[in-house]
Structure formats: C-alpha cells, structure tokens
C-alpha cells in the first residue's frame, strides 16, 4: 500500500491551478500536511497562456506555465504533498470522506475542490493551430496584445458583450459574430454594445474555420471563414484575433451531484467558500463564473485554506 493510502489525510486539494496551489501554500505553512492532486492538466488553464501581464508582482509580465511552476515549487517548499494523478470520484456521505483515483482509494477529513472550468470551444481545425496565437477565450487576459488591431468576438450573450466592449476600448475594430439575427444578451447590455461605434455585428453567421500564416516561427491568425446560417454561403473576414465567448463548462461532474451546483454546474459556496457539505470547500473557477482571473482564484484559494484550518481546529485536528 502506498504511503498516500495509509492514513486519513487532514485535507486533500483537488486541482492545480492558482486556487489549488495557493491553498496548498497556506495549509502547508499551517503544518496541516495538505495533499494536492494535480489532475490531468497540471497548472490548469494558465499553462495554455503565453504571457500574463496582470498578476501582481511581475511588472514585466510572466509566462503562464512558469507562474504555475513557481506556485507549485512554493507549495512544495511548505510541505504540500503533490500527487500527479486525477481524482475520479468521491464519497461525501460521511466523514472522513473517501476519494478514489483510477488505482487507489483513501480518506480525508476535509476537501478543497479547485478543478476550475473549461472554456467551450468550436472544435475547428484552426482553433488548435492558432491557440494563443490569435484564438483566445479571455479578453481581460489577452486583449492588450491586440491594441489598435481588429478582432472578433464569438457569442451573443452578456459575457460576449462584456468581452466585446472591453476589447472595443483597446482595438480599432471589433466584430461580433452571432448565429442569430438578434442578441441573447440582456437589454441593457445589448443596447450598450449596439451603441458602441467601433463594433460591427455579423448576424446569422457561424465560424467555419480560423485561418492564418503558419510559415513563421509562430502561427499567426489573419482571418475567419464565416458561414451563413441562412443560405450556408461562406465569406472571409480579416481579423488579428478571435475571442470565444460561448461559455464555460465547470469541471464538477466527478462529484456525482453530491454538492449543490447552480443551473450551469458551478458549485454553490457561501462567504467562507464552504459548499453545502460541511468540510468540503471550493475555490476558483469551479464556482466563480464572473471574474475568472488568476488573482481572484488565488484569493479564493487563500480563503478556502484559512476556513479549512478553522474547520479542522474545531474538529480537534491541528497537525
């Protein structure tokens, strides 16, 4: 039996993005011997981001994977046990909780769920080719790379309009590509977007593919192929980047419905990051569908860790 299966852990952190690593740092420094399961993508979504310019402390910016490796090293320094495996299921019906990977089963007094949310993609050939080279899912994260340029936002809801209006402050031109002839966004958001002078709406259109230049060291997006939802005709539109704003899928399915989630699948937490199950907390994009930033995820991870420390103290678990 592996060491990881021999005892009941004080706390298991599920997920290795900024929320998970921050929780590990705080709980490690509290001598609570946290165990962190990294999941399939070590470092989470930030490992797919080339440069982060808005994380405090790095005035010259920081490469996403490097930032996650720094956080991992810091968590490890303070005693977090890191397991490069994926939690497949949990049993939250009683404490200690039971967690299972593909090959092992073990228990924990408390859990922090920091599994994040995955952006919905269009599954086009060009998406993978030009990912982070003109194909993005976060305007606040990557919009500054396209100052004075032409970009497109795909989507018609409130989130898409927020992305488009943010980009309109930076970019010379913003196309909004929507499959219908009217927006799904709220009236106030739609009115603001429609009144933005450098935004143009491409109605009744879907993205057939992303095109660009692959001859250089790095691929570069140059345009989109649009397909009409009315007559299926196609046309090309020149853009420097495309921002997908068609939603996210929270990575909560492995919980099997044992914690309360909203209609979109995001975990519901209180002000202390606690779920409806005592001893189970959530942090980061798994519950936050508003901000979705590295710094806010780290903050939520900090909160969850401090609350777990208090919870364990109430249970008489101190080290």
Image: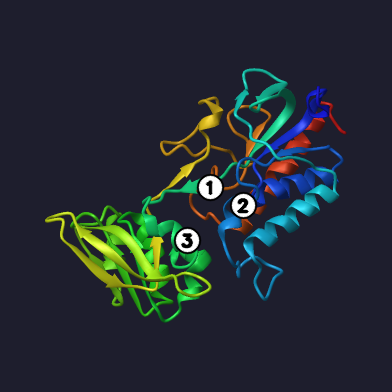
* Closer mark to the observer between disc 2 and disc 3: 3
Q: Depth check: give the residue in front, 54 or 290.
A: 54
Q: Is residue 110 left or right of residue 128?
A: right
Q: Which residue is at the far top?
A: 94
Horizontal and vertical percent position of residue 68: 68, 56
Dot 1: within a 10 Å radius of its alpha carbon, few (fewer than 14), some, or many (20 or more) residues?
many
* Closer mark to the observer between disc 1 and disc 3: 3
Residue lying at 49% horizontally and 52% vertically, measured from the top left: 290
Q: Which mark is residue 131?
A: 3
Residue at the disc numbered 2: 297
Q: Which mark is residue 124?
A: none
Q: How many marks?
A: 3
Horizontal and vertical percent position of residue 90: 62, 25
Please report whichever mark, 1 or 2, sits nearer to the chain's N-terminal start.
1
Quadrant occupied by the C terminus: top right
Q: Which residue is at the far front?
A: 215
Horizontal and vertical percent position of residue 303: 69, 46
Quadrant occupied by the N terminus: top right
- Asked if labels 2 and 1 touch by Cβ distance under 8 angstroms, the answer is yes
Please report whichever mark, 2 or 3, sits nearer to the chain's N-terminal start.
3
Q: Secondary structure at mark 3?
A: loop
Q: Is residue 195 in view from this perspective?
A: no
Residue lying at 25% horizontally and 62% vertically, measured from the top left: 226
Q: CA distance from mark 1 to mark 2?
A: 8 Å
Residue at the disc numbered 1: 288
Q: CA distance from mark 1 to mark 3?
A: 24 Å
């Amino acid at each position: 039996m592996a060491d990881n299966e021999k005892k009941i852990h004080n706390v298991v952190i599920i997920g290795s993005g900024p929320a998970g690593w921050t929780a590990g740092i705080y709980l490690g420094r509290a001598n609570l011997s946290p165990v962190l399961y990294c999941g399939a993508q070590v470092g989470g979504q930030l490992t797919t981001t080339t440069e982060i310019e808005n994380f405090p402390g790095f005035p010259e910016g920081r490469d996403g994977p490097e930032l996650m490796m720094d956080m991992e090293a810091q968590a490890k320094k303070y005693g977090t046990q890191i397991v490069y495996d994926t939690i497949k299921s949990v049993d939250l019906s009683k404490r200690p909780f039971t967690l299972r990977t593909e090959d092992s089963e073990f228990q924990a007094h408390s859990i922090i769920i920091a599994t994040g949310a995955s952006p919905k993609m269009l599954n086009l050939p060009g998406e993978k080719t030009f990912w982070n080279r003109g194909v993005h899912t976060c305007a606040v994260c990557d919009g500054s790379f396209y100052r004075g340029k032409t970009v497109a936002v795909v989507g018609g809801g409130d989130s898409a309009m927020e992305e488009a209006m943010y980009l309109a402050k930076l970019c010379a031109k913003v196309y909004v590509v929507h499959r219908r002839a009217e927006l799904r966004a709220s009236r106030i958001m739609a009115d603001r977007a429609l009144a933005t002078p450098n935004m143009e709406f491409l109605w009744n259109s879907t993205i057939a593919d992303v095109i660009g230049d692959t001859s250089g060291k790095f691929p570069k997006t140059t345009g989109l192929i649009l397909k009409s939802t009315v007559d299926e005709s196609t046309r090309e539109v020149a853009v420097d980047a495309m921002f997908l704003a068609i939603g996210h899928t929270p990575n909560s399915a492995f919980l099997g419905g044992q914690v309360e989630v909203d209609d979109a699948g995001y975990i519901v937490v209180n002000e202390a990051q606690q779920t409806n199950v005592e001893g189970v907390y959530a942090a980061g994009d798994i519950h936050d569908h508003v901000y979705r930033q590295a710094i806010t995820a780290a903050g939520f991870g900090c909160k969850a860790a401090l609350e777990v420390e208090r919870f364990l103290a109430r249970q008489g678990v101190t080290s």
